[in-house]
Image (cartoon, helix red, strand yellow):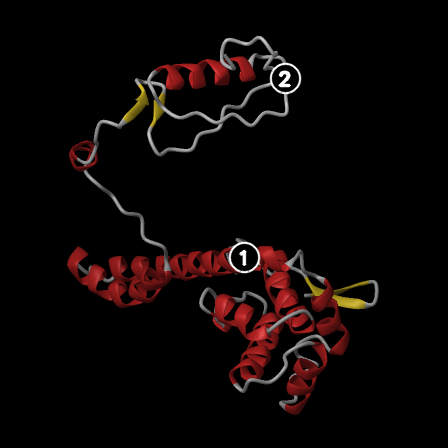
Amino acid sequence: MITRHGKHQRREREPHGNGAVPPHSVEAEEHVLGALLQYPERADPQRLWSELSALVCADDFYRPDHRLVFTAIQTLAIAQQPFDVEPVADELERLNLLEAAGGHAAVVQLAAEQAGLANAAAYARVVAERSHLRKLAGLGPKIAAAIADNSSAAQIVELVRPLLEPIADRTPRIELRHIADIVAEYREPEWLEPDILERRVQGVLAGQRNTFKSLIALHWMMCAALNQNPVVILSADEVLPANSTLQE
């Protein structure tokens, strides 16, 4: 279904026959496309294209108009051509697909619908993840039909294996390790100050105001100095009176 919001058209979510809406994020799709459409105006476009095209492909987009826009961007990027608003609209027009993509105004609107280049990769991962979930949900009817046909578990596994492999190849893997292996790798730290400060380790002492952070830090440094370790203190606080023991 297509409804109008202001000057631009926007598709409402269309449920499947069972009333369930497939997993997707229109917002994430818009931000990915918006980042790509705006990026050529700011820097070398190929860098962001290389990053995002490694995370998503056209089939990952739920909305057909978004798939068309991404495909047009992909065509121009591969040809080393600019892929901001006007070239993308021209490419869609050349293929007689501009109207199917929502028209020129929709492409312009996409270029405005982005939350910053720094977040583009995160939104691309959301688009890919929802695409994986849709594909996994599509396996349900196939498995149910195989069960109804009295297929064995082994036969069903072989049925879905080739369907799962493309998803598995693009899904980050979670490494599981045995706790014994992790414990075996533990090494006793080399202490600068026993059970307080490790050698060659940077640390941050943080806390609310007036909680004696500076005093605690000075105590640590005094302990280190008394153990013949070189100590340098750079402080913006007035915590070193002229007659302090540490200065002496």
Q: Could you give the CA–CA distance between mark 2 and mark 1, rounded to whole angstroms?
A: 45 Å
Asked if 223 appears above or below 28 in the picture, the reply is above
Nearer to us of marks 2 and 1 is 2
Residue identified by numbered label 2 = 209
User: Where residue 2 appears, x then y in whole percent?
Assistant: 71, 67
Other residues around mark 2 within 10 Å, as few (<14) / some (14–19) / many (≥20): few
Residue 75 image point, x, y percent: 55, 83
- Secondary structure at badge 1 equals loop
Dot 1 amino acid type: His
Establish if 220 lies above or below 122. Answer: above
Left or right, 121 with respect to 2, comes to left
- Closest to the observer, 99 or 199: 199
Where on the picture, by quarter, is residue 195? top left
| Label ID, residue 24 | 1
- The residue lying toward the viewer, choosing from 28 and 96, is 28
Residue at horizontal 43 percent and vertical 56 percent from the top: 133
Locate residue 190 relative to residue 80 in the image: left or right: left
What residue sits 56% from the left and 73% below the top?
A: 67
